[in-house]
Amino acid sequence: MGWHQDRTIAVQRRIDVPGFGPWTVKSCAVHVEPPFEITQRMVTLRVHLDEVDPDNAPLLIAPGSHGLGRIPTSRITATEASLGSLPCLAKSGDVWIYSTSILHASDTATWPRRRRVLQVDWAAEELPGGLQWLGIDNVESA
């Protein structure tokens, strides 16, 4: 997957709130792009169930990019080039915690194997206008 910043959050249902949009549905879950300030206050936890070595498409990050705010798509390549990239290698059981807004990518594995992770995006704030986070405790079967 090419270089990008995560820009959407999962919510229980669509409620039109100023500053939130566009809307999408991914894996039967409603997603919306919130104001980027919300994403900047979030963290992502990745629990690695399998080892991820340099040959198995590790997550790549552009160090320091999380402090740059929303990076326009037209500036992503130049931003990654100026900051460089680091692979996030992991042993089974390792946990990575990083800013959800970090610029990241993943290459194609040169020696593909299992690369299972449990990823949780976490925020410590309520959403406005009646929007509710879609969380582990309120996911319904599809």
Image (cartoon, rainbow, N blue to C red):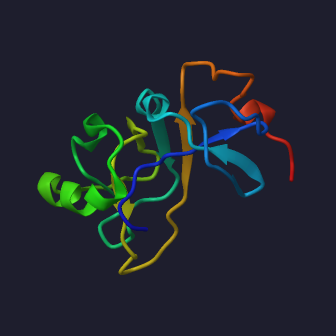
Number of numbered discs visible in the structure rendering: 0
Q: In the image, residue 136 lies at what x, y percent?
A: 71, 35
Q: In the image, residue 53 lies at what x, y percent?
A: 33, 64
Q: Quadrant of the N terminus?
A: bottom left
Asked whether residue 85 appears in the rendered view, the answer is no
Outermost residue toward the left in this view: 82
Q: Is residue 28 left or right of residue 133?
A: right
Q: Residue at x 21, y 54 (%)?
A: 79
Q: Is residue 35 above or below residue 56?
A: above
Q: Residue at x 54, y 37 (%)?
A: 121
Q: Residue at x 36, y 71 (%)?
A: 107
Q: 45 or 78: which is nearer to us? A: 78
Q: Is residue 61 left or right of residue 91?
A: left
Asked whether residue 107 appears in the rendered view, the answer is yes
Q: In the image, residue 83 lies at what x, y percent?
A: 15, 51
Outermost residue toward the front in this view: 18
Outermost residue toward the bottom in this view: 110
Q: 105 or 74: which is nearer to us? A: 74
Q: In the image, residue 38 lies at what x, y percent?
A: 49, 29
Q: Is residue 13 left or right of residue 78?
A: right
Q: Residue at x 57, y 33 (%)?
A: 19
Outermost residue toward the right in this view: 141
Q: Is residue 122 above or below residue 6?
A: above
